[in-house]
Image: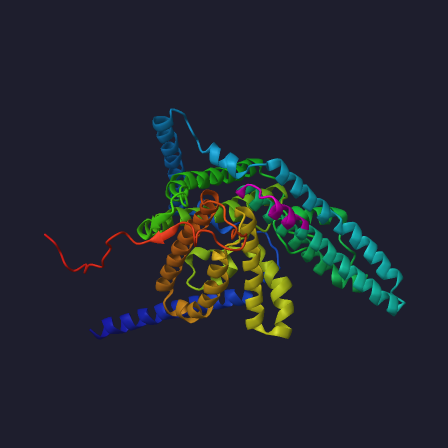
């Protein structure tokens, strides 16, 4: 009996030592974790999971099967109802309508971005010439800042003005706006990297080759050299681009089979029952979260990995395992490391010494939320700040709420976070289509405005006639 007790006590001590050792190892790993601006050779988390975990690979297969089923549903339904085969091309073509105009806007944004480099060379030459004349150097510095602001204002202002003046198709407009912000962030990133080099001539300015590489590399943090792979695996590049095309069709099927049946006629009648809206809201929860996951995979995994492979860019950590987190702060850091690193390096860190952590965090959220809202406003053709409220208000409030409770109850808080992902995306996939089709179907009014939602007044939302509340516990046999 005594021997058994001693043996169990010894095993318990070993187990505790193992657990504490693991915890210390995790803490040490957190301390040794490289900063966000350090680059190294590493693969994306999903790439590693697909290679080493057949269970995760099965989840990928499930999503592929869902895509095939949606395709079959579209083909069979249209063949029976309309006598023709539709593979979702109509939604894709409509979404990327007037693509020539979109390409012209993208070429304009690229041309403006390329003019930064000769401007940088001219400014550096003038700065070197005027270094011994402090008064003129201050004027030159002011002109340099003014030139950078003017360049950014031209890039952002002209693109936003053109898209706001005449609405472009949803997908084309979103692509152009995303590229506009990408180029703007690239300019800001390399400008910040060159400021210390202008003061210290021992470090040369970036070469044109390095600048061009940086413009298309999947990062917003400039370095003269990045970790590079030895060769381009073109089969992997083709596979990732096929995944991008698959996600585009995935979303077109979701739009055609879940959004259009519920919201395409919204606004054609003067009144609509509240029950229909509520039912539509919940019906859009599942397609909303599927679109959310597919969008993440398309942009941050397939697209970024395709370009990284083509450019032999070695650091593929574009995101981390955000799906297992129980803290919103961790989710925001892990969801999109490419943008997070830029926000932290060029907005948060410069603001912290003057404004403090709380104000700096709020400003980062504000900038990010406004950028997302501009993308949606220009894509849909109206300002409807649903995402701004979800991301910039509720998302900010969840930071302190989940900070401590997420550590104490990780499983419960992870469940809570996924509930917010489902519910939040269901709202987005309902309210934006409601407003979009209300503006299409409702009769024009003198009160119509880019900033005032039309779906609030047209159609009128009413309760079902003779509706009364009944006790759900009263069971009628």
Residue 47 in view, yes or no: no
In the rendered view, tell whether residue 427 sits above or below residue 70. Answer: below
Q: Is residue 123 visible?
A: yes
User: Looking at the picture, does residue 361 appear above or below residue 467?
Assistant: below
If the image is split into quadrants, where does the N terminus sit? bottom left
Residue 113 horizontal/vertical position (percent): 71, 49
Q: Is residue 271 left or right of residue 136?
A: left
State the image coordinates of residue 451 (x, y, percent, origin top left): 53, 55
Query: Which SS type dominates the magenta stretch?
Result: helix
Q: Is residue 73 left or right of residue 292?
A: left
Query: What residue lies at 50% left-to-right and 62% top-to-bottom?
Result: 392
Residue 141 in percent (x, y) is at 80, 64
Farthest residue toward the left? 477
* Res. 476 image quadrant: bottom left
Task: Out of 285 and 154, give the one closest to the viewer.
Answer: 154
Residue 224 x %, y %: 71, 53
Residue 196 within the magenta-colored segment of the rendering: no
Is 37 displayed left or right of 12 in the figure?
Answer: right
Task: Name the residue at the top extreme.
Answer: 83
Q: Nearer the viewer, residue 18 or 433?
A: 433
Q: Nearer the viewer, residue 289 or 156?
A: 156
Tell me which segment is drawn in magenta: 158-170
Confirm whether the magenta stretch covers residue 165: yes
């Amino acid at each position: 009996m005594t021997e058994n007790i001693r043996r169990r006590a010894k095993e318990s001590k070993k187990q505790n030592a193992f657990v504490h050792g693991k915890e210390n190892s995790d803490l040490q790993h957190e301390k040794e974790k490289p900063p966000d601006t350090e680059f190294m050779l590493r693969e994306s988390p999903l790439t590693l999971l697909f290679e080493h975990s057949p269970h995760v690979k099965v989840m990928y297969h499930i999503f592929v099967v869902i895509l095939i089923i949606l395709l079959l549903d579209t083909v069979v339904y249209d063949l029976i109802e309309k006598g023709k085969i539709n593979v979702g091309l109509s939604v894709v073509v409509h979404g990327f309508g007037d693509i020539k105009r979109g390409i012209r806007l993208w070429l304009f944004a690229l041309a403006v971005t390329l003019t930064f480099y000769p401007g940088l060379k001219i400014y550096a030459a003038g700065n070197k010439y005027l270094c011994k004349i402090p008064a003129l150097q201050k004027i030159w510095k002011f002109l340099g800042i003014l030139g950078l602001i003017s360049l950014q204002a031209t890039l952002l202002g002209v693109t936003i003005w053109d898209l706001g003046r005449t609405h472009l198709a949803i997908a084309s407009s979103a692509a152009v706006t995303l590229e506009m912000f990408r180029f703007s962030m690239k300019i800001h990133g390399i400008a910040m990297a060159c400021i210390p080099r202008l003061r210290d001539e021992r470090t040369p300015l970036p070469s044109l080759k390095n600048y061009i590489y940086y413009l298309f590399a999947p990062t917003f943090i400039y370095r003269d050299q990045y970790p590079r792979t030895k060769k381009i695996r073109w089969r992997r590049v083709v596979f990732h681009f096929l995944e991008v095309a698959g996600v585009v069709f995935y979303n077109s099927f979701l739009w055609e089979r879940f959004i259009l049946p519920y919201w395409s006629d919204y606004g054609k009648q003067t009144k609509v029952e509240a029950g229909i809206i509520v039912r539509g809201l919940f019906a859009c929860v599942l397609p909303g979260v599927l679109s959310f996951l597919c969008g993440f995979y398309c942009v941050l995994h397939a697209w970024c990995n395709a370009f990284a492979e083509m450019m032999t860019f070695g650091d593929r950590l574009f995101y981390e395992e955000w799906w297992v987190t129980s803290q919103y702060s961790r989710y925001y850091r892990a969801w999109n490391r490419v943008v997070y690193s830029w926000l932290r390096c060029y907005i948060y860190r410069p603001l912290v010494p003057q404004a403090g952590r709380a104000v700096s965090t709020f400003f980062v959220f504000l900038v990010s939320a406004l950028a997302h809202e501009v993308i949606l406003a220009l894509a849909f053709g109206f300002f409807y700040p649903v995402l701004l409220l979800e991301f910039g208000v509720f998302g900010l409030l969840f930071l302190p709420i989940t900070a401590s409770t997420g550590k104490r109850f990780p499983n419960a808080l992870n469940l809570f976070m996924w509930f917010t992902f489902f519910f939040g995306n269901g709202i987005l996939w309902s309210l934006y289509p409601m407003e979009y089709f209300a503006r299409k179907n409702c009769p024009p009014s003198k009160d119509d405005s880019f900033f005032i939602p039309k779906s609030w007044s047209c159609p009128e939302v009413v309760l079902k006639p003779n509706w009364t509340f009944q006790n759900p516990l009263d069971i009628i046999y």
